[in-house]
Image: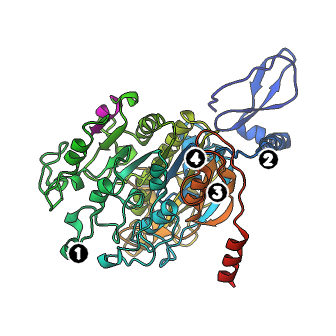
Amino acid sequence: MELSEILWLPEPTERVIINTDSTCVCAYSHPVGSLFLLSILNQEKDPLFWNTWAQHTLKNALTLQKLNQNTAKNLILFLGDGMGIPTVTAARILKGQLSGQSGEETQLEMDKFPFVALSKTYNTNAQVADSAGTATAYLCGVKANEGTVGVSAAAVRSQCNTTQGNEVTSILKWAKEAGKSVGIVTTTRVNHATPSAAYAHCVDRDWFSDGEMPAEAVQAGCKDIARQLFENIPNIDVIMGGGRKYMFPKNQSDVEYPGDKKHFGTRKDGRNLVEEWTNRMKNKKAQYVWNKRELLSVNPNNVDYILGLFEPGDLPYNLERNTETDPSLTEMVEVAIKILRKNPRGFYLLVEGERCALAGGRIDHGHHEGKAKQALHEAVEMDRAIGRAGLITSIYDTMTVVTADHSHMFNFGGYTPRGNTIFGLAPMLSDVDQKPFTAILYGNGPGFKVINGLRENVSTLDYQGTNYQAQSAVPLRMETHGGEDVAVFAKGPMAHLLHGVHEQNYIPHVMAYAACIGQNRDHCMSSGGASSLSPALPSLAALLTLTRLLC
């Protein structure tokens, strides 16, 4: 087992627990002061190991009785698109196994957050949600219909005339109006469903540019999502992700793939939105970048605004990323925070972790394609970004929330032994068809394969390959979302308000309350800094009104 550090005991002592970054190690101190370590499996046979570990955890938990009620100067939301609880667990095991450990005892960065809740993800018209309606919930504080972003449930998908009057604003806009810097970082297109709910009001998540819109919708005055990125909330401080082709005129070649027509511009209106942004920002400390080299050459002290579009569409999966040209999620997050944190009033940052061969958006895409290895490596990369963000911010004035928009039909089981590779086989054959099966399986998706009327024998395949599609019970070209609750991890000021089981639209209300922005500011004694918040109860009149509505 690899340890991040070994502590030597100066005096003879009884058995102790040594905390490392990912596990606890039981140790003896010999009378001569030397120390030797027992193997994980041997130490786990001793009840003292578990009792001591539990008591240590209890001691840490008791410190949480003193709540952090500071004002949140900064807000960070990490959104693992499609990162259901089975994905979190499998990613934890993978993280440990990548470090040479058995994996189960490993801690993800989000595991270290002191407060955890469950979020109910359904859309107003869907039991199993999509990423657009859920984004409207956790960004705008209002549940909505599937397929729509930044509009209430009164808006109908693809019906342009239901947009006006049904727009809802996001926490990103509330933060900007409060004088904070704001940013969006994603491994998908910047006009994908998740980030677009932060700034757009659109009845169809697929209206990436006017090239994807019906002519009647354009004529009726509806705006495409890429256009709204630059027009609805002027001067978003940080924008990073993919989606370059939606910003350029139709048939204009791409700077990175000039000979590939599928990456040409898509805009029918002839506008060059990147050029427009550059011209508008020319008197500001602003920079446009389109590759990793340009991004990492940025001096955050000299740049106040950055537009980074690193691919024509979504960024590639982290396992397939060109490390010379495409930045990692962690690299984007670090640059973003270093730019945003210069604002004395603080910042709001939305980070979507999902890359696809489709996009921190890519966790989601990996699952849709049945490619569990891609999806789980995306989750581990997002965990690295969470850890990096924690190192360059403070828990005393920064509220960080990690959650998912929805889950997937992904799971793992089969009575696998401790330390079994997460992408490996179950230790038994099926007692029906006498064939092996992998621990990871999908309820539906493209992994359903029958050969000569029988289930495919996975032992004849490279089931640990990067693009292996895990077997599924029901054949579908694309696997579907799952409908169960997802986890919400929280740390920092007022994080204790995220507890129990909540509707998904509760999340931005808590974050806004913690930062004294948005509609609920009566509890704020002072603005900025790390001032304490005084608990505020709704007025008696408001309570009576609510009672009448519910009765």
Q: Which residues are magenta?
A: 287-297
Q: Amino acid at mark 4?
A: Thr
Mark 1 in CB contact with mark 4 (< 8 angstroms) = no
Answer above or below: position of 12 versus 74: above
Which class describes the residues within 10 Å of circle 4: few (<14), some (14-19), or many (20+)?
many
User: Which quarter of the image is occupied by the C terminus?
Assistant: bottom right
Can residue 520 be seen in the rendering of this structure?
yes
Q: Is residue 348 left or right of residue 487?
A: left
Q: Which residue is mark 4?
A: 400
Inspect the magenta stretch and tell me whether residue 291 lies in it: yes
Q: Amino acid at mark 3?
A: Asp
Res. 331 image quadrant? top left
Q: Sequence-wise, which precedes: disc 2 or disc 3?
A: 2
Q: Sequence-wise, which precedes: disc 2 or disc 1?
A: 2
Can residue 463 be seen in the rendering of this structure?
no
- Label 1 vs label 3, nearer the camera: 3
Q: Which residue is mark 3?
A: 522
Answer above or below: position of 12 versus 205: above
Percent position of residue 339, x then y: 42, 35
**Where residue 220 is drawn, which disc sits there?**
1
Q: Sequence-wise, which precedes: disc 2 or disc 4?
A: 2
Which class describes the residues within 10 Å of circle 3: few (<14), some (14-19), or many (20+)?
some
Residue at image coords 66%, 50%: 494
Inspect the magenta stretch and tell me whether residue 182 lies in it: no
Residue at image coords 71%, 58%: 536
Mark-to-mark CA distance, 4 and 3: 22 Å
Residue at image coords 68%, 56%: 497
